[in-house]
Amino acid sequence: MSWVPFGMEEGKPSVLVDGVPDYMKKSLVDWMMQAELLLCCGGTSIYGEKWLDEDTRYELIKEFDRRTRQESHLCDDTTNKYFEENMNADLIGLQYTDYLLMKLDEDMRDEQCIFPSSEEFHSHIQNLDTILEESGSKWKVGERNSICGLEERVDPAMQQMVDNAMDSSSGYGQQLSEAWHYMFGREPNYSAAYEAAIKAVESIALPMVEPNNKDSTLSKAARVMRDQRWEFQIEAREENNVPGGVIQLLMSGLMNSQPDRHGGPDPVAVSREKAQAAVYSAVFLVQCFKAGLVRRPAS
């Protein structure tokens, strides 16, 4: 059982908040400062307390400014004073948190880095996820391009499904991971999310449907499934059914509904809703093929 704050209705989901609300700011700033201490540790005192190397922090923030292509002025003050007096906590605060996550992840994976320990980095990353969850933030700790970063919090059931599908070193797992993080990352790219969603399904479906056709595509595989009358465990009534079933229709629709597929002088931008539908469809299709629920008809 979890504690429900007085005055809130048990079992009723609260609205997730964007940005850095006032009640989360102190916790997030404390987390940033501890992250800086881990990343810019100049050594320890005789009492075992770490001290911050200001020159290393200066270089860290200069890199942040270069990567975000902005002048944050974080170098001008301590992190806590900066966010107490600066009105850019929502944008800069989330960007800097995302950046610090990436740097912590880098150092945690660096086998040459023995102090501070990788356990300290890992624990601090987990602490951020707790802060975000308890604050009702729409952001959580995830991965983008195999690097730790902020990503949008989604329905837990869908998250569990996609985690299962992405929990693989296979091509489809990696492509699905890319699609997910392009969709829900701090800087979403809906066109790239749609493209990666198609590639994820192609990666698992094409070797099954057309293993000897190197030029196969998702829509071509869908036609093969239609012509060969592939089977899926759930179909419409016979009078409403189509050869090859609903799966091949979804595969064909996924590829042929891509707005910017054919390019041209005036390409249509991929909307958030279109990309989200593509990514969710890819999760479903990958899971169905992975579980063996889509199969060639018995001869």
Image (cartoon, rainbow, N blue to C red):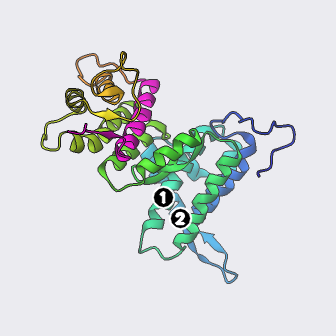
Residue kind at label 2, given as amino acid type: Leu
Residue 151 makes an appearance in the image:
no
Q: Where is residue 243 in the image (x, y as percent from the top left)?
A: 27, 24
**Is residue 175 rendered to the left or right of residue 214?**
right
In three-dimensional space, the C-alpha distance between marks 2 and 1, rounded to whole angstroms, equals 8 Å
Q: Which residue is drawn at the image coordinates 52% and 40% (left, top)?
A: 158
Q: Which residue is drawn at the image coordinates 21% and 33% (left, top)?
A: 217
Q: Name the residue under label 1.
A: 103
Residue kind at label 1, given as amino acid type: Lys
**The label number, if any, that marks residue 39 in the structure image:** 2
**Is residue 243 rendered to the left or right of residue 273?**
left
In the image, 162 versus 239, the foreground residue is 239
Q: Which quadrant does the C terminus fall into?
A: top left
Q: Is residue 268 magenta?
A: no
In the image, 198 versus 183, the foreground residue is 198
Disc 2 and disc 1 in contact, CB within 8 angstroms? yes
Q: Which residue is drawn at the image coordinates 18% and 39% (left, top)?
A: 210
Quadrant hosting residue 47: bottom right
Q: Is residue 273 magenta?
A: yes
Segment tinted magenta in the rendering:
271-299
Residue 288 makes an appearance in the image:
yes
Dot 1: element? helix
In the image, 241 versus 155, the foreground residue is 241
Q: How crowded is mark 2: few (under 14 residues within 10 Å), some or many (20 or more)?
A: many
Dot 2: element? helix
Q: Is residue 105 above or below residue 74?
A: below
Q: Residues within 10 Å of mark 1 (few under 14, many from 20)?
A: many
Q: Where is residue 112 in the image (x, y as percent from the top left)?
A: 41, 75
Q: Where is residue 107 in the image (x, y as percent from the top left)?
A: 46, 65
Majority secondary structure of the magenta segment? helix
In the image, 98 versus 59, the foreground residue is 98
